[in-house]
Amino acid sequence: MLDVIGVGAVDDLFAQIPDLVRLQEPLRLPAGLSEQEVAADVAAMAARNRSAEDLVCFAGAGAYDHFVPAVVWALAGRSEFATSYTPYQPELSQGVLQALFEFQSMLCELTGMEVANASLYDGATALVEAVHMARSGSGRVLVSGALDPRLLHTLRTYGRGAGFEPEVWPTPDGHGGPPSVEEGVSAVVVQHPNVFGVLEDVPTLAEAAHAAGARLIQVFDPMTLGVLAPPGDMGADIAVAEGQPLGNHLNFGGPNLGMIAARMKDVRRMPGRIVGQTVDVDGRPGYVLTLQAREQHIRREKATSNICTN
């Protein structure tokens, strides 16, 4: 690259910076550090210029200031992603469709589920959509008392219009055993890890839900799936999450990114749009909108949702 632009060395690119403001000696950083470790060391050096220490925020209950590697936003800021929106002319939107297909595939691998859509507004509305998918007729909805209160509030708000009131079972020690799932219950909702950071017994909850003919909905944290079993392996029928920890900024609390994944048997009840991979007439890979249950794509009365976006 230096040969192409006619520069002898990388240092020559900074020759226009006056010597007065340039370091006269190299930074004494140990070799072989990760980006996050280097950033922490440099931040510690910069902190010498300040009298007060940075504050660490423990508020949020789901939205946190994670370390985001620089490459994430370098890639996300590229023009082919910056203008990515729902492709109304999919045959002309192969780049957008491929990005959405890769996102869906990644989410299925993370969760151990079979199908995922091209995202929702945030984690709270993703839970609402999951309950809509699980409910049949006037089915009841049981919710763990260790669910993030904001998710419960959102579910109650939407439930008024859909004709249900979430029924909360108590969790006196920060987690609770399986609820009494009776006939007429369509959905059982649990968060794992829950709002207190406690790990729930999801397989037992799933067994209780399935024995009564209900679906188990698990709210998960994508950052935990490197060490915890995925929802699909623990018996969850639908998995939802707030995707902000994957690299989105806090944005003053949201909205962020809603993720939802399910079993193939529920694919036609899933809101939004699902991108599939195929081949064109010449055998080359191509991407298509396989299913579109969004009111902007199909007749409003046949839509399952109108709140989804990517």
Image (cartoon, grey):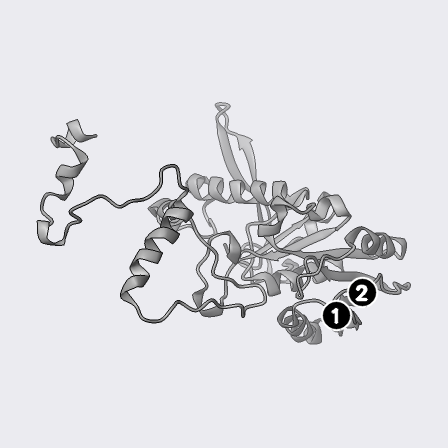
Residue at image coords 54%, 61%: 121
Quadrant (top left, top right, bottom left, bottom right) of the N terminus: top left
**Residue 11 in the image: x percent, y percent?**
16, 38
At 50% from the left edge and 54% from the top edge, which residue is drawn?
A: 310
Spot occupied by residue 35 in the image (x, y as percentages of width and height): 39, 45
Picture coordinates of residue 41, whole percent (x, y): 36, 51
Query: In the drawing, does residue 209 fall left or right of residue 83?
Result: right
Front position in the image: 173 or 89: 173
**Near-viewer residue (63 or 240):** 63
Between 48 and 228, the residue placed more toward the observer is 48
Labels 1 and 2: the sequence-earlier one: 1
Provide the secondary structure element on which disc 1 rests: loop
What residue is rendered at 53% in x and 63% in y?
63
Mark 1 packing: few (<14 Cα in 10 Å), some, or many (20+)? many
Judged left or right of residue 203, residue 305 is left
Instruction: Look at the picture and state if 296 lies above or below 228.
Output: below
SS of the residue under disc 2: loop
Mark 2, residue position: 176
| Amino acid type of the residue tagged 2 in the rendering | Gly
Q: Which mark is residue 47?
A: none
Q: Please state which of the two labelled residues, at mark 1 or mark 2, is closer to the viewer.
A: 2
* Marks 1 and 2 in Cβ contact (< 8 Å): yes
The residue identified by callout 1 is: 145
